[in-house]
Amino acid sequence: MTVRVQTQDFDAGLEISQLRNARKDIGAVVSFIGQVRDLNEGDAVSQLTLEHYPGMTEKSLEAIVSQAKSRWNIFDALVIHRVGTLQPLDQIVLVAVSSAHRGEAFKACEFIMDYLKTEAPFWKKEVTNFGERWIDAKLNDDDARERWVK
């Protein structure tokens, strides 16, 4: 299990390749890459700043990944989340999960992303044509997380 919070960009292909090649019994690798949109809630976005509490954030991400590992039969998971000031089309997050079979990997990857969107201690501020604004998880993000509680 690898969790990294960093300002620098990442090479998703390289990261996924390293995860994929870590074991010979891997039958599936599922990944998700999130990036900065240039439009949110109908407004043009020119910049996104992500803030966090070092140490606490990594522990929270590790707990999310541990929950996924306890729910599904996965071999490994990788979470890389960027912080700092980002521009539209910049990569924000990479989640990759390896397992013997695709079903387990898909579920674990989706679970990790749903919890990252709602539980991880990141604070996001957008710059739009109308000024700066802090953004929260959306209701559909909360709904997505809730389906895992049942």
Image: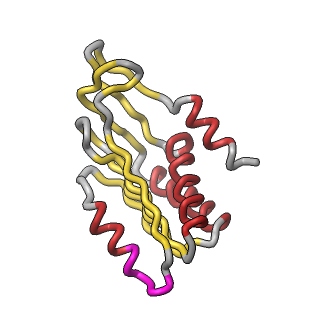
- Residue sitting at 25 percent across and 43 percent down? 90
Corner quadrant of residue 103: bottom right
- Residue sitting at 44 percent across and 62 percent down? 96
Q: Is residue 23 above or below residue 93?
A: below
Q: Residue 37 location in percent, x, y?
A: 32, 34
Between residue 54 and residue 91, name the one nearer to us.
91
Residue sitting at the far bottom:
24
Q: From the viewer's perspective, is 8 left or right of 82? A: left
Q: Please name the predominant secondary structure of the magenta segment in the image.
A: loop
Residue 139 sits inside the magenta stretch: no
Q: Residue 105 location in percent, x, y?
A: 54, 65
Between residue 30 and residue 58, name the one nearer to us.
30
Corner quadrant of residue 39: top left
Q: From the viewer's perspective, is 25 left or right of 35? A: right
Q: Residue 64 location in percent, x, y?
A: 57, 56
- Residue sitting at 56 percent across and 47 percent down? 115
Q: Residue 75 location in percent, x, y?
A: 53, 75
Q: From the viewer's perspective, is 2 left or right of 110? A: left
Residue interval drawn in magenta? 19-25
